[in-house]
Amino acid sequence: MDIQRRQLLRVLASATAISSASRFACAEDYPSRPITLIVGFAAGGPTDVYARVLADPLQNSLGVPVKVENVNGAAGSIAAGRVASAVPDGYTLSIGPGMSTHVINGAIYDLSYDVVTDFTPVALLSFLPQVILSKKAIPADDLKGLISWLRANPDTTMQATSGAGSPGHIAGILFQKETDTRFGFVPYRGLGPALQDLVAGRVDLMIDAGLGSMHFVQDGSIKAFAVMAKDRFEIAPEIPTVDEAGTPGLYTSLWQAIFAPKGTPRDVIAKLDGAIIRALADQAVRGRLAKLGHVIVPTEEQIPQVLAAYQKSEIARWWPIIKEAGIKPE
């Protein structure tokens, strides 16, 4: 038995050494074939457009094709699951709004993977601030006036959302907690139909990531009260921040990030991160993302360690709010 055990241990040790050698060789040769960016939302949507803006400069930097694949459904959780179960070799990556796929979904869905431990952070990319909106007929002209009106009329207004557990829904719950107001929520199949009903006056409120609603704000079809961030929205600088509007610290933004499967070699992650940093430094790329409303994080923060720490801080912030509200998937 001892001889057999020693033989087995030698075989296992040899196999481990071969596996490790292959892994390091893979990291040294990376990349040698096409890379796929998995998007958990529909083709043509904001996340899909964002991924395609980055795909070309990443392809130029890495020297291999970078393709975008849409795996729609369950608020991005199906796509994230696809990446979590992929071979950890750097050729299958998740790109998208980390607040949804790597924070909120972990609190409301019964997932087959862990949103933290089954991924390797690659890079934090940018933020997309949310904006507090209302239909034109709401009798308030600023955020303080809106809050006063909501307090005087509890449970009589409705906020449109793109679904239970969506970032706009979670932001609405935060808004209620911080302002001592009460209103209901109406889930829609996407932000487009929700915005249409806001413009038509069929719902009262909405918290949107900004870009899609700005045309209607600027032509006076709806009202914008504040940007839920420290800085004003570059594409609509006339809208005050929540700090300026009298509710300091009421921040919530969508954040874009790239994750790889757990176990992806560090050398591969470093090559990917370097390519991402170069892509986000390109002025043409920065200009295109700015037009989409995104605020690119400083270069020194576009690294795995910052993404890992930020994701954990977001989980610590949002999971108690989500669980207290008892939000369940539709």
Image: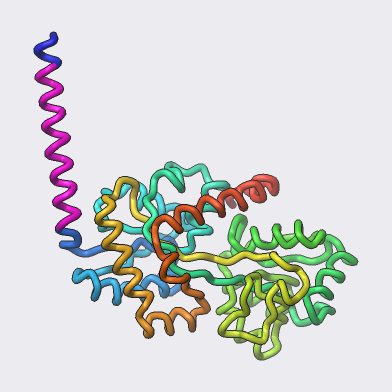
Q: Is residue 194 visible?
A: no
* Residue 330 among those drawn in magenta: no
**Point 14% across, 51% down: residue:** 25
- In the displayed orientation, state which residue is furthest to the top: 1
From the viewer's side, name the closer residue of 192 and 246: 246
| Dominant secondary-structure state across the stretch colored magenta | helix
**Point 60% across, 86% down: residue:** 215
What x and y, as percent, mark residue 77?
A: 46, 53
**Point 86% across, 70% down: residue:** 148
- In the displayed orientation, state which residue is furthest to the bottom: 219
Q: On the rendered structure, is 225 left or right of 328?
A: right
Q: On the rendered structure, is 183 left or right of 116?
A: right
What x and y, as percent, mark residue 294?
A: 50, 75
Q: On the rendered structure, is 312 left or right of 245?
A: left
Above or below residue 117? Residue 291 is: below
From the viewer's side, name the closer residue of 211 and 28: 28
Rendering colour mode: rainbow
Corner quadrant of residue 245: bottom right
Above or below residue 253? Residue 90 is: above
What x and y, as percent, mark residue 9?
A: 15, 22
- In the displayed orientation, state which residue is furthest to the front: 300
Q: How many marks?
A: 0
Above or below residue 286? Residue 115 is: above
Q: Quadrant of the N terminus?
A: top left
- The segment highlighted magenta reads 6-28
Q: On the rendered structure, is 180 left or right of 22?
A: right
**Point 59% across, 60% down: residue:** 166
Corner quadrant of residue 181: bottom right
* Residue 27 among those drawn in magenta: yes
What x and y, as percent, mark residue 6?
A: 12, 17
Q: Is residue 253 visible?
A: yes
